[in-house]
Amino acid sequence: MSKTAPEAEKASPLSGFSVAVATVAVVAFAVWLAQISLSAYLGTLLALLFINVALAVSLNLTNGLSGLFSLGHPAFMTIGGYSAAILTYPERRKSVMLPDLPEFLATNEVALFPAVLAAGLIAIVVAIVVGFPVLRLRGHYLAVATLGLIVIVQNLATNWSGITRGGSGLSGIPRLTTIWWAFGLMVLVIAVTWRVKFSSLGRAMMATRENPLAAECAGVSTFRVRMVAFVLGAFFAAIAGALLVHLISVITPKTYSVLLAFNLVVMVVIGGTGSISGAVIIAAGLTVLSETLRPMEESLGLYGMSQVIVALSLILILFFRPQGLFGSGEPIFIRRFFSGRFLG
Amino acid sequence: MSQYVFQQLVNGLALGSLYALVAIGFSMIYGIVRLINFAHGDLVMIGAFSALAMVALGVPWPLTLLFVVVVGAVAGMTIETVVFRTMRGAPQATGFIATLAVSIAIQNSALMILTGQPRNFLFPAAMRQRIPIGTVSASLTDIVIIGLTIVLIAVLFLIVYRTRLGTAMRATAENLTAARLMGVAVNRTILAAFAIGSALAAVAGLLWGGKFGQIDPLLGFVPGLKAFVACVIGGVGSIGGAMLGGYILGLAEVLFVGLLPPVFAGYRDTFVFSLLILILLIKPSGLFVRHVEDRA
C-alpha cells in the first residue's frame, strides 16, 4: 500500500497545488490555441472528448476506487440531461413542444449554470434513494440492478410525455455548452477525484474495495463510503449528461444507453481500475478512435464495426493484462510531477 | 371464466414460458461457473435469426427447430471455450466484464451484418388460428409455446436428475474442486451445461419471434435482463426456481398491463425492474430457496 501513498509531505521547491494550477493554465492555453485554429467540427469533438474524460474519471471514482460495479451512469446522465434541457428550453417554444409542463417550469427559462447545478442536485437525490437498496448488493448483482435502473429511467422518459415529450425526445435545445464548459467540468472532476483518492476518504474507499470485512473492522462504514462514491459519481454523470445535451442539442430516452455504460467501463478497465491517469488517457484515445472509425463505418456501410473492435480489444486486454494500463495506481512520473518534486 | 381473463392468463403463461426457457439456461450456467453470462440474452437473438434464415430457405419447421437447437448449443459452447474457460479463476469482476464485452460484440456484429432494420418473422398461417377450449379460445401459437416449453423442461429435468451427466453437473455446481477430485470431467460437464442452456435460449428466440412477429439484432437485451429477474425471484442457481420465477414474472407482467388502467401499460418495464430491486432488498436469496451464498 505504501507505494501509492501520498508523498507530498517531503520538502519540495513547489507545492503540489501550484503545479496543478500551472498545468491547468498551460492546458487551457493549448485549448484556446486549438479553439481559434481548429474547425467548428474539431472544436465540438474536443468538447466531446473532455466530457468523455470527465465521465470516465467520475465512473472510476465509483467503480475503480470503491469497487462497486455500477453500470448506472447513463441513467443519471439521462436524468441530468432532461432536467437541464427542460430548464434552459426557450420559453416561447415550450408552449409548442411541451404544452403540459407545470406552470413554474413552463414560464421559466434558466441560464446554463443553474440548470446544470439543478440537474446535478436532482441526480444526487435519485442516487441516494436508489442507493439504499442497490448498494447493499455485491458484484454482478449491483451491475444488473443498475442496468435495471437504466431501463427504468428510459421507460419513464418514454412514457412520462408531459415532461419529456416521450419517445421522440426534445430537439432544438439551445447550444449553450462551449468548449470551456466541457474543459471546466473535466478539470473539476479530475481535481475532485484526485483529492478524494489521496485522502482518508479515498483510502477508506479502496479498503472497502479490497476487503469490506477488514474495512468494517478498521472502523470504516462500508455503506457510507459506497454511498458517497455512488452519489458523487451520479452528480458528475448528471452534469456531464446536461452539458452533452447542450452540445448536441437533442435528447431522447435512448441518447444515453447501455452501450455508453459499456464504453465507460471499457475506459476504466483498460486504463486500470482506480487509475485516474489511465482513465484520462484511454477515454481520450477511445473518443478519437471511434470518431476516426466512423467515416470508415459509413463508407463501408458496416455500422457497429468500431464497437465490435472495442469489445474484442477489451476481451484481449482482460486476457493478457487484466490490471489495465496502470493497475490501480498513478504512474510514478505523474505523482512526482504533481507533488512538485520534478525539479529535484 | 370470461374470454378476456382467460386470454390474459394464456398470454402470461406463454410469456412466462419464454422467460423460463431463457432463465433456466442462465441459472444453470450461473450455478456451475458462478458467473453471470451477460451474453445469454444474445443467444435468444441468434436463435431467432437462425430460424428466420432456415424459414427463408424453405426448410420445414421441425428441421428448423432442430437447427436452432444445434446453433444455440454450438454458440454457447464457443462462448464457454473461448471466454469462460480462459477466465476461469479470474476475479469475478473481470469475468463478467468479459461476458458484457461478448454481448456487445455479438450485438454489434449482428448489427453490422444484418443492419438494425427489424424483420418480420411469421409462423405459418395455421399457427395463428384460434383454438376453442370450451367457451373460450386461445391462439395456437401460445398453446405451442406453452406445450413445447413443458416438454423441453421435462427433458431437462430428466437429464439433470436421471443421467450421469446430470449428476456430474449437480456435483460440479456443488463444488467444482471436489467434483474434479471425484473424477468428474469438469470442463466437459461445464461445456454440456453451456450447450443445453444456450440451446434452450435459442429455442426461446424462435418462439419469441413467432409470438411477437418482428426480430432485430438488439432483441436479446430485454429477455436477457428479465431472465435475470426471473432467476432472482426463484433464487439464482436453482433450475426449478428459475422456471417458477419465469412463470411468475410472465404472469405478473401480463396482469400488471391487463388489469390496471391502460395509462399504466407503458410502465411495464419500470414495474419489472422495480420488482427486481425490491426482491433483492427484501429476500435476496429468492422466494423459493432456503439458503444460498449471500449477495449483500
Image: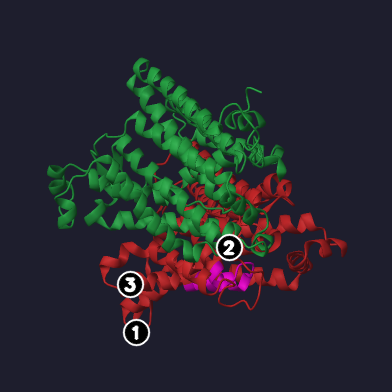
Chain colours: A green, B red
Give residue A232's position: percent from left, percent from top.
Answer: 46, 50
**Where is mark 1, residue-wise?**
B1
Q: Secondary structure at mark 3?
A: helix
Q: Amino acid at mark 2?
A: Ser
Q: Secondary structure at mark 2?
A: loop
Q: Which of B184 and B232 lies nearest the eye of the viewer? A: B232
Compared with residue A57, is residue B293 higher up or lower down, i.e. above or below? Answer: below
Q: Which of B125 and A218 lies nearest the eye of the viewer? A: A218
Q: Amino acid at mark 3?
A: Gly
Compared with residue A244, is residue B295 higher up or lower down, i.e. above or below? Answer: below
Q: Secondary structure at mark 1?
A: loop
> Going 62% across and 46% down the picture, which residue do you hit?
B98
> Going 39% across and 58% down the picture, which residue do you hit?
A126
> Going 49% across and 36% down the picture, which residue do you hit?
B113
**Residue A74: mark:** none
Give residue B242's position: percent from left, percent from top.
Answer: 58, 69
Q: Are marks 3 and 2 on the same chain?
A: no
- Quote the CA–CA distance across marks 2 and 1: 55 Å
User: In this rendering, does residue B114 appear at all?
Assistant: no
Q: Which of B185 and A73 lies nearest the eye of the viewer? A: A73
Q: Amino acid at mark 1?
A: Met
**Where is mark 2, residue-wise?**
A221
Q: Which residues are magenta?
A: B232-248
Mark earlier in primary sequence (3, 1)? 1
Mark nearer the viewer, 2 or 1: 2
Among the 4 quarters of the image, the one containing residue B285: bottom right
Q: Is residue A84 left or right of residue A275?
A: left
- Quote the CA–CA distance across marks 3 and 1: 15 Å
Label 2 Cα neighbours within 10 Å, binned few <14 / some 14-19 / many ≥20: some
Among the 4 quarters of the image, the one containing residue A310: top right
Q: Chain of mark 3?
A: B
> Going 33% across and 72% down the picture, which residue do you hit?
B258
